[in-house]
Amino acid sequence: MALDSNLNLEMNNYILHLETATKVCSVAISNNGKVISIKETVSDGYIHSESLTLFIQDVLNEAQLALADLSAVSVSAGPGSYTGLRIGLSTAKGLCFALNIPLIAIDTLTALKNVIPSGEMPVIPMLDARRMEVYAQVFETNGKTLQELDAIVLTEDSFSDFEPFVVLGDGAAKCKEMWGHRNITWNENVLCSAKGQATIAYEKFQKKKFENLAYFSPIYLKDANGVRR
């Protein structure tokens, strides 16, 4: 008896991705790790409270899906904007509770690094953390961490041990002039995006690496007033 060819098809696993850690408001849906719908915008102000639920409905409509079709929700876990992270997480938790589906947390800088393809140099995603401070993490070309996530006050020779390297994110602008003489590739226009969560979230979904809905909280590094935690 011939096997049913449908048995060889991978089951659909639709995951909703929410990115609200910065001034980018980004929402995407993936199926088995591949983005099938995305909507995002960058604003001088934080528009997440007004736009997030609208963007969710827009990507569902574009993908011709309903909330009941979702297998999980992933959310940017920080660091980043205190208010933005809280809005994203509360929305993600609400959906997970209502739909009885798991919550997946994705470190913001890991997702930012994942927006671009792997290259031949270390990658340092940076988020603006006020004044001359950034949230930063250093990744090897294979994705492994070379320097752990931290809030760092920039100096002329910060990260010199890792040159040459690539810089991503909205924190790059404050150091580009100061580091103009160094061997650095600048991708400051590469910003946080929900699409950077897709492959990581799917891998966590397969391994059932889910968060506790009642107790999970974002990675703030600083409190709402910008003071180190």
Image (cartoon, rainbow, N blue to C red):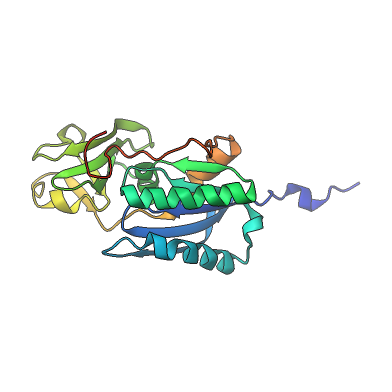
Residue 146 picture location, percent across and down: 30, 31
Looking at the picture, tell me which residue is in the foreground, 202 or 23: 23
Residue 160 picture location, percent across and down: 15, 35
Looking at the picture, tell me which residue is in the foreground, 121 or 100: 100
Looking at the picture, tell me which residue is in the foreground, 94 or 122: 94
Residue 62 picture location, percent across and down: 56, 68
Q: Quadrant of the C terminus?
A: top left
Residue 69 in view in this figure: yes
Residue 122 picture location, percent across and down: 28, 39
Looking at the picture, tell me which residue is in the foreground, 6 or 91: 91
Kindly identify the residue that appears in the image at 11 percent across and 46 percent down: 179
Left or right of residue 44, residue 41 in this image: right
Kindly identify the residue that appears in the image at 31 percent across and 56 percent down: 190
Left or right of residue 184, residue 42 in this image: right
Number of marks present in the image shown: 0
Kindly identify the residue that appears in the image at 26 percent across and 35 percent down: 150
User: To which quarter of the image does residue 220 belong?
Assistant: top left
